[in-house]
Image (cartoon, helix red, strand yellow):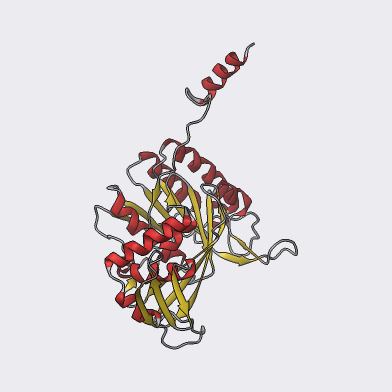
Amino acid sequence: MTLDDVFKDIEKISGKGSIMRGVEIKDIERITVPATGINRMLYGGIPKGRLIEFSGAESSGKTTTSLLIAGAYQKQDTRPAFFIDAEGTYDPRWAAMVGVDNSPEHFIKWAPENVTAEEVFDKILKVAETNEVGMIILDSIPALVPQQEDAKNMTEYQMGGISKPLTVFSRKLQKVLLKNPTVTFIGINQVRDNMSQYGPSTTTVGGHGWKHMCSIRIEFRSENVDKNGAYLSDSAENPAGVRINAALKKNKTAPRNRKLAFYSIDFETGFNEIADLVGTAITAGVIKQAGSSFSYVDKETGEVLVNGQGRAKLIAKITPELAEMIKKEMEENDN
């Protein structure tokens, strides 16, 4: 038997075209999001056709970031976003503040009640197979109840939990996404204390199988901030918003050398793209900071194009033209 004969046998079981002599280099299609830091960290935005995990403690920015991405997706694709509200906490007003279009043509929400995890996973697979939605968000994995738990009473001890059905689901979903590479899945997870004496102090729900199948894993945490973006303590009575810190744990779609992203959400106005751009530019060194004074300087002429005492005053002075200049300079620095 020759090598070609073996390859023909392989194509019989895995499909014609599964064997490729040489591979064409192609850019991964991505969803550009308003949070500049996320785009920089992931080299262009959220990749399509991949499994993505968002994890973190409560109120760390997981759901808010997924909604921010959903809103960006809606502007780049005519298919609706599909949101599985397993926790029953979806807030349409807050979602709209961060950019989500809640209209029937662009957004579909499913609140699964009295449904097992296996049934939810099965329906997600069927939805993905239709290729009629391009963004699927599951909020959240720990909120689902596996069939073996659902069938037992509270006094019966169970091992395994969500891990086995989640692993099986992730493997099947990966095959579906290979056929429909413009569908993106975001699974929201929680960080728990690691009860084992080995490894890190925290872990996520779902076991190693799910982690292995994810192309991207990001862990979030958030801190209270005032109107100038200064950090406040957790006990602060009137924070203006939160500063979300995103830490990249895994990336199979680009280099992993940019491991942190920061962006802010205002409780009254939602996501401010200019404020986010300024924050990212400060972190990247494009906007210079000296104490509480900020300035943006033309790198060719040395002319101070804009400055401000305090971040809020600087943000108020950023025109659309200046914003484009700042974006362009950050892109040039990245390249």
- Residue 306: x and y, percent? 34, 75
Q: Nearer the viewer, residue 261 or 133?
A: 261
- Residue 321: x and y, percent? 28, 65
Q: Which of 294 and 149 is in front in this view?
A: 294
Query: Does any portion of residue 167 appear in the rendered image?
Result: yes
Question: Residue farthest to the top?
Answer: 1
Question: Residue farthest to the bottom?
Answer: 237
Which residue is painted at 37% across and 61% down in the image? 327
- Residue 166: x and y, percent? 55, 50
Q: Nearer the viewer, residue 155 or 237?
A: 237
Which residue is painted at 33% across and 65% down in the image? 323
Query: Vertically, is 109 above or below 302?
Result: above
Q: Which of 274 and 171 is in front in this view?
A: 274
Question: Residue farthest to the front?
Answer: 301
Position of the N terminus, as image quadrant, is top right
Q: Answer left or right for 130 relative to 1.
A: left
Query: Vertically, is 187 above or below 229?
Result: above
Query: Does any portion of residue 138 appear in the rendered image?
Result: no
Give the number of marks: 0
Query: Vertically, is 89 above or below 117?
Result: below
Query: Vertically, is 16 above or below 323?
Result: above
- Residue 170: x and y, percent? 53, 46
Question: Residue farthest to the right?
Answer: 197
Q: In which quarter of the image is residue 83?
A: bottom left
